[in-house]
Amino acid sequence: MPTTSWNRHHVLSLADFTPDEYNIVLQTAASFREVLSRRTKKVPALQGQVIANLFFEPSTRTRSSFELAAKRLSADTLNFASSTSSMTKGETILDTAKTYLAMGTDIMVIRHKDAGVPQAIAQEMDRLDVRVSVLNAGDGQHEHPSQGLLDLFTITTLLNPENPRLELLAGKKVAIVGDILHSRVARSNIWSITASGAELHLAAPPTLLPQLFADFGKNRPGKLFLHWELDAALADADFVMTLRLQKERMTANLLPSLREYHHRFGINRERLAQCKPHVKVLHPGPVNRGVEISSDLMDDPEFSLIQTQVTSGVAVRMALLYLIGSSKVA
Ligand code: CP
């Protein structure tokens, strides 16, 4: 496994990921994808380490795949959900984290509805001078780095199954369509895709794509374009990523209606005709069928990579846990 230039103790954001770091994750995930295809899908890499999944916000994919990834690496796992925890009796987030620290946790995987919570816990662990790593599993509308990495792995593996690398995306056209304003997935993907040298096109109604997103494209290898209509974003695209309307993070009525939204920005077969013939569609999930993507397209294996993304998530999260866990004992 390629761990030589991995020095990162926490994974909180992709904003400062280097090309080397992307490629180490991609290559390590490719090795684990091979492990997951074996009859015995388990390796002893993190035997004896304790990984705590601290989910203060609901999750299906991220929580389950981090848990499965930890188990495939032979780590011991602790699962926390705030609704069934002592937080209902007034315990704070930091005291919850310190409780898991006292039980010998080595890596904390943290999801929270508010931006900055994983960063705050990582800072507290560093202040306490304990060698506990924090992995951001999605914080508010800030970032979802493991999702950005699994999306990158899904795309680059399609381009070269044996040797997925960041550079494979250079010169490709990627469109991200939907509720970009509220999406942590979009932010992490903006960092990874613009790092690759691809052209990234963001498309949404103006209320969900403010002009300030143009700043994300400054001083990046790849070019970033903003569109408030769909057609120019889809024209000749190689990959289209659709996003859910995140109503739980909307503080005002930002759209006339879901029907109107689907009519203008929903992805369906007819719209894909503008893209390259081999175009593939991604969605981080969960999906609102018939809103951001038509139900039949979501289930069509000729175009949809949605199930592949979920499968990729286990190998990529194994890679992250392995890289962080191995660097802790080094
Ligand atoms: N993509 C994603 O984060 O899904 P979950 O909310 O189910 O984890």
Image: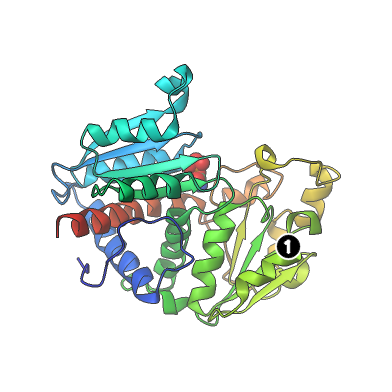
Image location (x, y in percent) of residue 94? 40, 35
- Name which quarter of the figure residue 256 lies in: top right
Image location (x, y in percent) of residue 303? 56, 60
- Name which quarter of the figure residue 114 lies in: top right
Q: Would you say residue 85 is visible in this rendering?
A: no
Question: Relative to the observer, which residue lies in front, 114 or 21?
Answer: 114
* SS class, disc 1: helix
Is the N terminus in the top left, top right, bottom left or bottom right quadrant? bottom left
Q: Would you say residue 24 is visible in this rendering?
A: yes
Q: Which residue is mark 1?
A: 271
Q: Is residue 184 left or right of residue 34?
A: right
**Residue in view at x 27 percent, y 66 percent:** 7
**Residue in view at x 40 percent, y 39 percent:** 63
Is the C terminus in the top left, top right, bottom left or bottom right quadrant? bottom left
In this view, which residue lies farthest toward the top? 89
The amino acid beneath tag 1 is Arg
Image location (x, y in percent) of residue 176? 63, 62
In this view, which residue lies farthest toward the right? 256
